[in-house]
Image: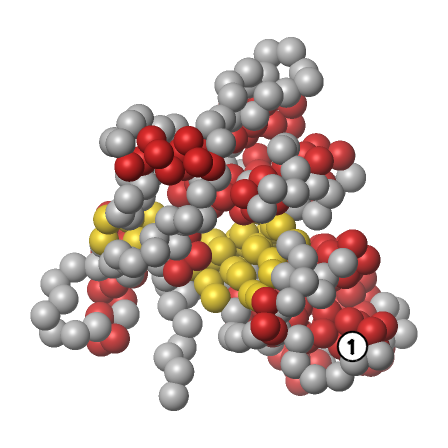
Amino acid sequence: MRLARIKGDGGSSAVYHCMSRVVGGERLLNEACREKLSEILMSLSAFCGLEVITYCMMPNHFHLLIRVPEAREVSDAELLERAEAFYGKKGVLSTLARDGIELRGRIDQPVRETLLGRMGDVSVFMKEFKQRFSRWFNRHSDRYGTLWAERFKSVLVEDCPKALQTVASYIDLNPVRAGMVEDPKEYRHCGYAAAVAGGNGQVRRGLMSFLNGKSWSEASAEYRTGLLLRSAESGHSKKKALDRKAILAALRDGGQLRPGEVLRLRIRHLSDGVVLGSKGFVDEVFERYRERFGPNRRSGARPIRAVPLPGLMSLRDLRVDTVG
């Protein structure tokens, strides 16, 4: 029996780094598939009331950084608007909700509970996200059966600038690590590229939620500086990152590396660490889930070994194959 996923406490917002891989690691997700994944992500997150901070759709897997806001009351008018935007005005739930308002002045409770049950929960969101894409993919590929290799993985990330910038940068640098592009703004299937292109206000707002810049121009300059990328705009970062071999050599030799260089490596703690954040945050989550751990374990926070990410710790003590 698998354990329930570790989640936020429900009394405040919670951020998750979610990942899933295609069965067998096959590179089945072509350009059209990655476009469809992004389309479903935006429409489903708007319906569920989740905030997309950034994302990256790769040929055989995807990464999402999403925030589940603090729970709040949703009016009938907002519920109907969100249902119609996602299911269409002729959708069954949309029609039932509208009929309830028009005939009785309110959405009937069973319909309201059904709609609310699909909102504000990362597990429900991810199940719907993966299933919707699988149905589309199988229909358009004349295929049937399982598409995704496993239950999706997630890391509960502290909702603070240091942790969010680290994970967001790691996600947006996926195509750089894979050798597909030199700059993530050239890879149209990641959140940063969508935000730079200007057509996706959701991701701009998501990235700006942890950056200091008051405008997108200021925030994007700050973000690029953290990524150690050159920019075509004056005043932006002119730093140049080391290549992967040089970064690994510097780590072996004990050299000083900046976060933007470290994040060009695959770091297991950011995908398998279960919880990521400050020592206090990780310890607090550990105490809430204390019954899952053996009696000899006294604390939750564990260091991120082999790579310098100051101020961040994880719940899992990963020691094998931590970077690559």
Which is nearer the eye, 102 or 121? 121
Q: Disc 1 on helix, strand or loop?
A: helix
State the image coordinates of residue 226 (x, y, percent, origin top left): 48, 28
Residue at position x 44%, y 43% in the image: 265
Q: In this view, which residue lies farthest toward the top?
A: 234
Corner quadrant of residue 198: top right
Q: Is any atom of residue 165 visible in this view?
A: no
Q: Is any atom of residue 92 visible in this view?
A: yes
Which is nearer the eye, 248 or 194? 248
**Residue 71 versus residue 173 in the image, above or below:** below
State the image coordinates of residue 201 (x, y, percent, origin top left): 71, 40
Total marks drawn?
1
Provide the residue designation for mark 1.
138
Residue at position x 52%, y 69% in the image: 152
Residue at position x 60%, y 42% in the image: 179
Residue at position x 27%, y 70% in the image: 289
State the image coordinates of residue 274 (x, y, percent, origin top left): 37, 61
State the image coordinates of residue 190 (x, y, percent, origin top left): 66, 45
Which is nearer the eye, 37 or 253? 253
